[in-house]
Structure formats: C-alpha cells, structure tokens
Image (cartoon, grey):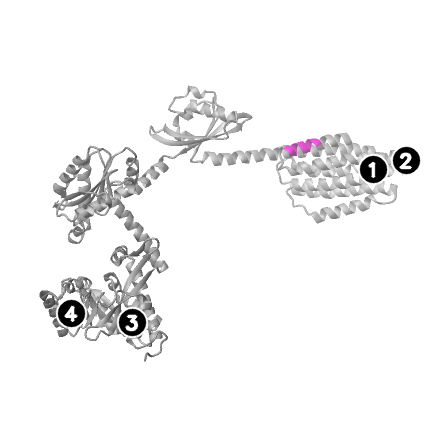
C-alpha cells in the first residue's frame, strides 16, 4: 500500500509540475503521499514494544487527517467547487477527536466506520457534481463510493480485515489516481487548444504578417503574410527558403538574422526595406524577429509590418509642415536648413529676400482669390526662371526668398530676378504687372551666421523699398551688427520695464513775464546697467516698434501721478506735470481708463496732470484723437499739442481738437531772435490767442531767445536757460521756492 501510494502520488505531482494550472492533481498527489504514511504508522504501533509503539500514533494521525483533507480539496477542485476553509477545519477537528479514542478496539471499528461515512457522502456529492460532464471526471464519484466500501472488511472483521481493507483501498486509489491523471491531461489538452485558438485569433486576424522559419524552411505564415507575399500559398513545408523566388523573401537576410538569434548574439533583430508584394507594387515593410521554439525545434518568428501608408502620411505631414499650402514652395524652415547647409567655412552663398510691392492692395480691390492667383503665378514665374540652380522659398504673405550656393551666380541671379519681375503675369481674371523690392546678402561677406544673413537680406529689402519700381539693394556689412544690437536692446528694454529701471526727470516751465514756476514736463530716462544712460529717442522708438510702448507709457504715467501725490504731501500743493503720450497709446481704447485709474490710485486731482500729444499723431488719426481728447477734457485733464510747427496741422483741426496748450517746436525757437523766426513765432501766438490757447516755447537756451519768445507772445518758457531736466529731489526744491517753503516744509520768512 505504501509503495503503490508513493508511486501514484509522485506521478500526480509530476503531472502538476508540468501543468501547474491543474491544482487538483497536486492536491490528490499530496493526499496519496499522506495515505502512504498511515500503514507505516500502523506498523510501528503494532510491532514496537510499549511505550515505543506510541511513535506510530502521530504518523497515523497526520497521515489520516492530511489524506482526507487533501482528498476533499482535490475532489472539490476537480468538480470546480469552491473550497470552504471553515468546513475543512471542522472536518480536521472531528477526525482528530476520533483518533484519540482511548480504546484500541473502539478505534479499530470506529475509524473505518467514519471513513465509510465520509467516502459515501463525498462520493455521492461528487456523482452529483460531475455526472453532467463528458470526461473521465464522472468516474470519480463511483470510485469514492467504492473506496468507502473497502472499509467494510475492517468494520466486519476488525484487525483480521485490515489486509483486505488495505488491498482494496490501494486498488481503488490507483484507479482514482489514474482518473485524475487522465483528467489533468485532458484539461491540459483543452488549455493547449484554447491557447492555440487564442494564437489563431491573434495571428490569423492580425494586420501584421507573422512568419516562422527554422532558417531553412517556412514553418508558418498567417493570412496577413500571405496578403503581403501572395505566392507564399505555393510554398510547401519541405521547400527550402533558398529555392523561393528572390522577390518573395530575402532568404539570405533571414538566414543571417536567424543564425545570430539562435546563437544568442542578438536578443532581437529589426530591419526594413521595400519589397515587391502580391499586387506588383513596392511596399515599405518593417521586420522584427526573435527566437522561439516551434514544435520542439529552435525557430525564428518574424513580425512584418506594412508601413507604406503610415510613411506616406508622415511624408505628407512633413511636406505640409515644410511647404507653403498656396504655392507649394518650401517654407521658412526649409530656408533655414538650406542656409545652415550652405553657410559653412570656405563656402559661398547668396540670399535674396523679395517682397512684392503694394501686393496688399490687391485683396481689397480685386478680392482674395485674385490675390492668391497673382501669388501663385508669380511663384511659378520665379520657379521657371530660376530652374534647378537655386532654391525658391515662400517666407509668407507676399515675401519670397532665393538661396543660391553658386559663388559665380550673383550677377546672373540679379539679372534673372529683374527679368521675372518685368514680365506680365497672366491669371484667369486678367493680366497684372508687379514690382518687387529685393534685398541681397552674401555669405560670408555680409554675415557669418544663417540667421544674421537672413536679417541682412531683409534689411536690404526694406532699403530697396525706398526706390520706386523693381529694385535690388545689396546688404551692408553693418546690418548684421545693427540687427543684433536692436534685438539685444529690445530684450534689455523688456527687462527694464519689468524691473522699473526707467525713471522720470522733470524740466521746469516758467511764466514768460515773471519767471514763476508754472509746471514740469516729465521726461523718461533709462540708466541701463553696464552701459549708462540711453537716449530717449532710441528706446522710445524701440518701444513703439515692438508694442512695448503701452506698458512703458502706463509705467511712466503711474510714476508721474505718484510723484505729484508725494509733492502735494510735502509742499501742500503742486504745479501741473506734463506727460508725453505716444500715438499708439492714444489709439488704445483703454487709455482713458488707464489715466483715470492712475489718478484715483494716488488721489491726484485731474488738474495737476497734462498730457502732451504730437502734431503728427493728431493729423494721422484725427477722428479717434478728437474722441479721446474730448473724454480726457471731460475728465478734467488738460491736453497740449507738442512739437507744433513740424507737421501739417490745419486751422480747422486746431479748432476741432479740445486743446489747451500749444508747444512750439524747438526747431522754430532755435533761430530766435532772427526777424523771420520772430515773425513765425508771433504768427503762431496770434493764432493761439484767437483759439484761446496757451503757448509754450521749448528749447530756450539763451537770454536772447527768452526775450524774443516773450516779446512774440509766448506765455510759458522751457529750456536749458532756466533748468535742465531735474531729478525729483531737485524739482522738489523748485516747488518749495515757488510756494515759499523751507526744506522742512515750514514757511520761509
């Protein structure tokens, strides 16, 4: 009994080790091994002298309890029933109590009886659970009932019946073990069938080709592989790869990678290339290979991906990203790549930036469709004229660029471009003549870097726009430095505005008759770190060109209002402070609210603030300017026209604008006291008097100029003769003297 149980238990455990998902085989294997321990314990108990015979009791106890518990687990798992740990624990306790019955005679009768009842109950339940199945599992229930019947000899004959009991139970256990072995193998086969079916679902319906080869023969190919290589259907399992047509599979390449994979030189291999496929077209295929085992033979599995459409889409996206949609020409990114390629040491490159003059007039007058047709026709004309010798690029809008690496083509390139612009453009709507402004820059003569070369050509193009008609201007060497300096200054100005490096100085304006202080003009100053003071003409121009003038103007307006509030606190009163306003600010719809917010923030009455606008701003945008100035006057803020006499303002404009002050430009003050200059100033003062306007003469630098301006009728004077622009503390001293205050704020005697 022991030998047979051990052999059967080992067989079951080996099956489980091969198919670990069949846990019922594991449980029955351990149960059978535990049953093999019971006869050994019984032998020790009956053959050894007391008290050594008691050593057999633990063996019998452990073997019997483990046998029945593991057998129960195995049957439940085989019947796909849920294990209940509490039930198994209760069963173990009952068995332990039965084995501890003090009388040997009672144990001899009681234990087989318990086994009989246990196997009858378990067998009956197993018959009920497994009878509907079609496999060998149906035999387990009857065999358990038969195993229970083998307990009858021990019950009827006591110890004399143990031999028959052991013989019968051993035979039945062998039968049960065989049933479990067959069940495990059947279920393993079912699992393999499911895996194969899953493999078929994954490969047969895959859009990627799957091929398996042993390096010499084609072992497997899925439908996708057949679709890619249509003639694989004619390949027999014994046909060698080398015998196949060369347009079917590259046998040499497959054999090379197969050997490297099988020799563990590579974990995986990948390659790609174009292949002639079933429909006779060239397809772009990507291959990935790794080693596997196929029917016990080392093999290589190859995954074939058709990237033709994906690569075509990628190329289309790349073309769209690098080409202009309207003309089909390469765009700026391609131009920069070409410049990087051509602008190398000891190389030569010519770049021409071409802008169509007055092209923007075409859309409002002829419509956007005509404008697009003109651009397309001009692009085709340039492309035909240049041929393959140069790269034509559309930068955007009505701008094109031509880059030519030929060092001897500069003159010929210029001649060809001029010729293309002179020819009429024929479009469906008619014929058009165009002019173009062209800027030419040469590497390395005008720039040493691609970006600098492009900036130099653009600067030359804007220079060419000053010449009427089609014109080409050669870049200047300094344009690169100027462009770099402008960019550097722009970045520095942005930081200066954020960090409030820009401050205000204040130049006094005095009464022409008495010399009494009447007001200040706030003048912006920028002390740039590491450089020093920067001219306002320079950085104000940069701010207007880059759109930073709005932020800068808001900063200066806020600073002026803050200073007015501080002076009013110190001196008890203040004089009006004039702040210059850029035309860009004046056209901003939110400018009125900006002024009102600044006044309210610092509690400054509007009468202390004067805004100065330029004559050119008023002339260029008369309607918008008139509305803004009217709203400012309603707010209580005075408005002065600065630099009067340099523009083209008319009498009707002066009458319509709600102004209070005219400031005569220093260009009309410098010639004073020349008679003709005096006559001009007198005429302006008479005009201002008729319009009820105050007149300020700025740029007074000598006593003669002051006397002449006073005699001509100017009300206020401003200039170096009275004071240079002053820092805020020095301007405060003027206020104290004006209001008769000492530095401590007390009235001077």
Left or right of 245, for residue 295: right
C-alpha gap between disc 4 and disc 3: 23 Å
Residue 399 in which image quadrant: top left
User: Closer to the camera: disc 2 or disc 3?
Assistant: 3
* Number of marks: 4
Kindly identify which residue carries mark 4.
Answer: 709
C-alpha gap between disc 2 and disc 1: 24 Å
Secondary structure of the residue carrying tag 3 is helix
User: Closer to the camera: disc 2 or disc 1?
Assistant: 2
Q: Which of 631 and 54 is in front in this view?
A: 631
Mark 1 vs mark 4: which is more N-terminal?
A: 1
Kindly identify which residue carries mark 1.
Answer: 154
Residue 607 in which image quadrant: bottom left
- How would you rate the neighbour count of disc 4 (Cα within 10 Å): few for under 14, some for 14-19, many for 20 or more? many
Secondary structure of the residue carrying tag 1 is helix
Mark 2 vs mark 3: which is more N-terminal?
A: 2
In the picture, the quarter occupied by the C terminus is bottom left
- The percent position of residue 120, horizontal first and vertical second, equals 74, 42
C-alpha gap between disc 2 and disc 4: 146 Å
Q: Which of 119 and 269 is in front in this view?
A: 269
Magenta part mainly helix, strand or loop?
helix
Residue segment shown in magenta: 10-17
Secondary structure of the residue carrying tag 2 is loop
User: Closer to the camera: disc 2 or disc 4?
Assistant: 4
Q: Is residue 244 visible?
A: yes
Q: Which mark is residue 49?
A: 2
Kindly identify which residue carries mark 3.
Answer: 734
Q: Is residue 12 magenta-colored?
A: yes
């Amino acid at each position: 009994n022991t030998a047979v149980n051990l052999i059967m238990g080992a067989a079951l455990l080996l099956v489980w080790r091969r198919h670990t998902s069949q846990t019922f085989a594991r449980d029955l294997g351990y149960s059978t091994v535990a049953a093999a321990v019971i006869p050994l314990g019984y032998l020790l108990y009956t053959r050894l002298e007391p008290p050594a015979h008691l050593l057999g009791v633990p063996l019998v106890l452990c073997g019997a309890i483990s046998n029945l518990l593991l057998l129960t687990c195995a049957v439940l798992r085989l019947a796909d029933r849920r294990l209940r740990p509490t039930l198994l624990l209760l069963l173990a306790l009952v068995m332990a109590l039965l084995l501890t019955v003090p009388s040997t005679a009672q144990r001899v009768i009681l234990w087989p009886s318990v086994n009989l009842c246990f196997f009858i109950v378990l067998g009956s339940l197993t018959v009920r659970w497994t009878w509907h199945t079609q496999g060998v599992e149906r035999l387990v229930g009857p065999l358990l009932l038969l195993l229970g019947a083998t307990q009858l000899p021990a019950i009827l004959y006591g110890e004399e019946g143990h031999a028959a009991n052991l013989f019968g139970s051993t035979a039945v256990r062998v039968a049960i073990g065989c049933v479990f072995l067959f069940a495990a193998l059947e279920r393993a086969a079912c699992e393999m069938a499911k895996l194969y079916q899953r493999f078929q679902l994954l490969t047969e319906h895959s859009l990627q080709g799957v091929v398996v080869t042993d390096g010499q023969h084609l072992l497997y190919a899925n439908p996708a592989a057949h679709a890619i290589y249509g003639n694989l259907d004619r390949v027999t399992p014994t046909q060698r790869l080398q015998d196949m047509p060369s347009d079917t599979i590259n046998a040499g390449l497959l054999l090379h990678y197969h050997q490297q994979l099988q020799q563990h030189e590579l974990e995986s291999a990948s390659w790609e290339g174009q292949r002639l496929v079933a429909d006779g077209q060239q397809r772009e295929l990507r291959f990935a290979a790794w080693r596997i085992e196929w029917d016990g033979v080392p093999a290589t599995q190859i995954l074939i991906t058709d990237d033709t459409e994906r690569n075509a889409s990628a190329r289309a996206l790349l073309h769209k990203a690098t080409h202009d949609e309207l003309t089909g020409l390469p765009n700026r990114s391609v131009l920069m790549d070409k410049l990087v390629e051509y602008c190398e040491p000891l190389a030569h490159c010519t770049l021409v930036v071409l802008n169509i003059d007055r092209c923007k007039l075409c859309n409002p007058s002829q419509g956007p469709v005509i404008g697009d047709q003109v651009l397309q026709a001009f692009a085709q004309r340039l492309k035909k004229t240049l041929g393959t010798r140069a790269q034509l690029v559309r930068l955007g809008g009505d701008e094109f660029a031509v880059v030519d690496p030929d060092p001897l083509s500069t003159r010929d390139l210029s001649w060809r471009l001029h010729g293309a612009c002179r020819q009429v453009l024929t479009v469906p709507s008619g014929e058009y003549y165009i002019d173009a402004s062209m800027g030419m820059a040469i590497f390395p003569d005008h720039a040493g870097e691609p970006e600098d070369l492009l900036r130099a050509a653009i600067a030359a193009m804007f220079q060419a726009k000053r010449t009427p008609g089609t014109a080409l201007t050669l870049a200047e060497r300094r344009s690169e430095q100027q462009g770099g300096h402008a960019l550097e200054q722009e970045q520095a100005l942005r930081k200066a505005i954020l960090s409030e490096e820009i401050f205000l100085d204040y130049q006094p304006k005095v009464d022409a008759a008495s010399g009494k202080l009447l007001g200040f003009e706030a003048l912006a100053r920028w002390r740039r770190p590491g450089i020093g003071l920067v001219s306002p003409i320079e950085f104000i121009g940069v701010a207007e060109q880059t759109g930073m003038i709005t932020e800068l103007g808001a900063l200066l307006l806020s600073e002026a209002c803050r200073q007015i509030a501080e002076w009013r606190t110190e001196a008890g009163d203040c004089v009006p402070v004039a702040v210059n306003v850029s035309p860009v600010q004046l056209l901003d719809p939110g400018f009125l609210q900006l002024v009102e917010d600044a006044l309210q923030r610092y509690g400054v009455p509007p009468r202390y603030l004067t805004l100065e606008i330029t004559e050119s701003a008023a002339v260029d945008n008369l309607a918008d300017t008139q509305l803004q100035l009217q709203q400012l006057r309603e707010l209580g803020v005075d408005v002065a026209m600065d630099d009067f006499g340099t523009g083209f303002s008319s009498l009707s404009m002066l009458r319509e604008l709600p102004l209070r002050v005219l400031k005569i430009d220093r260009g009309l003050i410098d010639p004073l006291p020349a008679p003709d200059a005096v006559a001009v100033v007198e005429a302006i003062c008479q005009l201002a008097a008729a319009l009820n306007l105050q007149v300020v003469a700025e740029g007074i630098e000598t006593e003669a100029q002051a006397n002449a301006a006073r005699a001509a009728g100017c009300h206020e004077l401003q200039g170096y003769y009275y004071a240079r622009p002053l820092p805020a503390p020095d301007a405060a001293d003027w206020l104290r003297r004006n209001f008769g205050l000492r530095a401590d704020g007390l009235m001077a005697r």
